[in-house]
Image (cartoon, grey):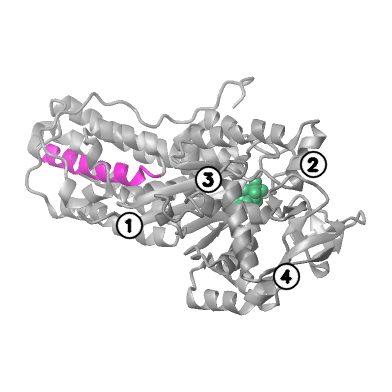
Amino acid sequence: MATAPKFYLTTAISYPNGAPHIGHAYEVVAADAICRFKRLDGYDVYFQTGTDEHGQKIQQAAAKQGLTALELVDVMAPKFKAMADALNCAYDRFIRTTDADHLPSTLELWRRMEANGDIYLDRYAGWYSVRDEAYYAEEETHLNADGVRIGGQGTPVEWTEEESYFFRLSAYQDKLLALYESQPDFVGPETRRNEVVSFVKGGLQDLSISRTTFDWGLPVPGAPKHVMYVWVDALNNYVTGCGFPDENDPRWHYWPADVHIIGKDIIRFHSVYWPAFLMSAGLALPKRVFGHGFLLSKGEKMSKSVGNVVDPFDLAAAYGVDQLRYFFLREVSFGQDGNYSHEAIVGRINADLANDLGNLAQRSLSMIAKNCEGRVPSPGAFTEGDQAMLALADAALAKARAAMEDFALHVVLAEIWAVVAEANRYFAANEPWRLTKSDPARRDTVLYVTAEVLRQVAILTLPVIPEAAGKLLDLLAVAPDARVFASLGESGRLVGGTTLPAPSAIFPRYVEPEAGQVA
Ligand code: ME8
């Protein structure tokens, strides 16, 4: 038997300096949908997410609460894991950078970069943002109205001077440019690629990769005063998860990652520093880095001071897990920023899920239960219209796959909903409810075609709304092993006469809670 092609996807690992927010939820849901899609399409998938637990930002947050850094991350990291679980994200590993296997892995990365002549000791003097855990060149900073110096991503920077190990990033400028040239989709989407290429063309400074003014980090080998710069530690999680440095580890074959799914604010770390570290250490490079956009609350960036940091657990409880997942992935063009609001979420739930898909399923399955003895109806000869309807459903996988090549999750869903819309037109135009007396055989054919289209829509939507799509497949009596993309199209057609369970609703409409109740 041919072995399945592998697919290794990672999300960013989040800073557990506070509770997870809707941006974290968005990223892990998108990553999960891509992984589920690939699994259903026959890939051997490895999906890693987790938390980034070292560095000054965590240490400062802990100190503010009177906790040690370890105490803080031991409270917060489980909340990130619980969020991924609550949102039905089927990750293979939730990595924490405090996990025991991450230290030997990261020491080995360091050792290899050092052996390659890329690490030297010097002094750092420059601007540092603790919030971004990032160094900024003077020209990337400005003074704001209050006289506070602000870095490239809008956060305050502070002057930092200390002894530091440096990574010879400047030596990788040409190699990186050659990489972007030879693999045009290495960084996506296009806007992010252009941004990275022009940053690298502008010239690369060597990178400070150790700190001496605090101690919450991985130790630099042979230099007890130094802890590693948190980004060296953080990026390396991606190979730790594959068993690095043990190349006999059964997970090692997953490396290199097929894609790192991250937010647009950390594209530079992933598409400049990380490939340079890997080249230096003699390791294979990830195939792609994709920077999604930011989720904004009615156009504003989330921040605790604006008071619009939304708790993902509350959202899931208010709207439903599948509903929230669908909203994230349908409403926002993956790769661009998107807005969320109560109105927008309710609009999507009621229009797309409750009306378009839910009602069609409910109406057609109730008619089948009532008129066809609760069995899949046996179709007669197909008309041209029936054939066109089936052909549209059969063609959806190819369109979804093509969109998935660009991680265009919103296009994947738009293609599937184009089939749903056509199925609604087909059902309305053929009026099966009028045929019971005049032509029951024709009614059965129309109901069969509708149910068969629903089968395909349910399989295709499993990556995004796993629970509801699974329920729809239960109602259609589709066997568990037939819930894969290989069963789409003609090969997996519903079989007339198959007994069906009693129908029930899959998507209730969202109804505003009574005044006084919290949504
Ligand atoms: O950056 N909308 O951690 P983090 C969408 N530890 N995505 C958002 C977002 C928003 N409003 N806010 C943040 C870090 N994100 C590092 C990563 S990886 C080796 C280390 C995304 O907790 C953000 O872009 O600040 C990033 O991809 C992820 O959430 C974690 O952000």
Give the Cα separation between the discs numbered 4 and 2: 26 Å
Number of other residues with Cα within 10 Å of mark 1, as a class: few under 14, some 14 to 19, many 20 or more: few
- Image quarter hosting the C terminus: top right
Q: Which mark sits nearer the N-terminus, 3 or 4?
A: 3
Give the Cα separation between the discs numbered 3 and 1: 21 Å
In the figure, is residue 487 to the left or right of 436? right
Task: Give the label on residue 49, or none.
Answer: 3
Number of other residues with Cα within 10 Å of mark 2, as a class: few under 14, some 14 to 19, many 20 or more: some
Please say whether residue 428 is visible from this viewpoint. Answer: no
Question: Disc 1 on helix, strand or loop?
Answer: loop
Q: Which mark sits nearer the N-terminus, 1 or 4?
A: 1
Task: Give the label on residue 5, or none.
Answer: 1
* Residue receiving disc 4: 206
Question: Disc 4 on helix, strand or loop?
Answer: loop
Give the Cα separation between the discs numbered 3 and 4: 29 Å
Q: Position of residue 256 (x, y in %)?
A: 46, 60
Q: Position of residue 239 (x, y in %)?
A: 52, 54
Please say whether residue 7 is visible from this viewpoint. Answer: yes
Task: Give the label on residue 60, or none.
Answer: 2
Which residues are the magenta region? 442-463
Give the vertical position of 97 relative to 172 (above or below). Answer: above
Task: Inspect the image, locate mark 1, and give the three-letter code of the amino acid beneath it.
Answer: Pro
Task: Inspect the image, locate mark 4, and give the three-letter code of the amino acid beneath it.
Answer: Asp
User: Farthest residue toward the right?
Assistant: 147
Task: Inspect the image, locate mark 3, and give the three-letter code of the amino acid beneath it.
Answer: Thr
- Nearer to me, 453 or 218: 218
- Nearer to me, 303 or 129: 129
